[in-house]
Amino acid sequence: MSCIKNGFETLKGKNEKALVGFVTAGDPDFDRSVEIVRAMCDGGMDVLELGIPFSDPTADGPVIQRSSQRALKSGMSLVRVLEMVKIVRGFTSIPIVLFGYYNPIFRYGGKAFCQDSLAAGTDGVLIVDLPPEESAELTSQWEGADFDFIRLVAPTTGPDRMKQIADEASGFIYLVSMTGVTGSQGLDSSKVGAVIAPLKAVTDLPVCVGFGISTPDHVKAVAMVSDGVVVGSAFERLIEENLENPGLCGMVREYTQSLKDATKI
């Protein structure tokens, strides 16, 4: 059983939903990024999505775009992201998913990326701009590797397409709650439930919902109809607004705990 699958099974046994937290690796710099992740883990986060900084993050809103720019400016690269995973793995056993775009992975090399990610302690990857039709050139190089490929489903995706995407997924499925980019406002949990139902009809994988989720009330509402809740831009906004604040890690820990408490239904 993969680390991700085991994590969701454990949470199910405790009547909890997964809190999936995203931050950009290396924002605002390598050392502080590690400490921010540690604070998230101390706050009770269940799954870490560690963003690979990229110059053109087209699916991300301005908050995460700026976080990528700060990380790149501080010298982050995919090699350094994997170095960070090794450090993080030293203080937490929660699933770690790399989140990014295909270009850095393509340049790194598909087989080497999988091997080095696993060696570092990564459990899976989500590649925003690599649909099922185009991913075989990458995944064919992972033969026999226990490395989950998280897939995205949009709120406008039809049932047939949902099944096609789900059949190519492992670990969990990331359901985008609304059209737009990360950090978008206007979450409507009732509409989320309406999208989850047909997706659940075509897959047994856990479904985690992201985009527009930033408060405990948001988390509680979405957790009622999903297997997990993804929070990303809100973490990065907290970081950006407190770059020079020595109490940032404490704020991150408390914020994480407030979100995690809302997943206990």
Image (cartoon, rainbow, N blue to C red):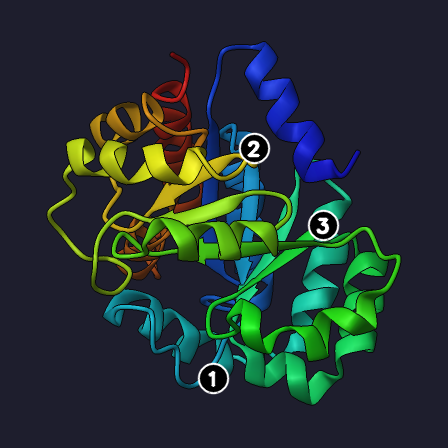
Q: Residue furthest front?
A: 160
Q: Which residue is mark 2?
A: 204
Tell me if I can see residue 68 in this picture: yes
Q: Position of residue 251 (x, y in %)?
A: 36, 39
CB contact under 8 Å: marks 1 and 3: no
Task: Give 209 or 158, whichever is nearer the viewer.
Answer: 158
The amino acid pointed to by label 3 is: Asp
Query: What residue is at 59 percent from the left and 51 percent from the top?
Result: 167
Q: Residues within 10 Å of mark 3 (few under 14, many from 20)?
A: many
The amino acid pointed to by label 1 is: Lys
Q: Residues within 10 Å of mark 1 (few under 14, many from 20)?
A: some
Q: Position of residue 223 (x, y in %)?
A: 35, 26
Instruction: Tell me if 13 is positioned left or right of 200 in this view.
Output: right
Q: Which residue is mark 3?
A: 123
Q: Earlier in the sequence, mark 2 or mark 1?
A: 1
Q: Regarding mark 3 in the picture, which secondary structure is present there?
A: loop
CB contact under 8 Å: marks 2 and 3: no
Task: Give 45 or 185, whichever is nearer the viewer.
Answer: 185
Q: Position of residue 229 (x, y in %)?
A: 39, 36
Q: Earlier in the sequence, mark 1 or mark 3?
A: 1
Q: CA distance from mark 2 to mark 3?
A: 19 Å
Q: Which residue is mark 1?
A: 73
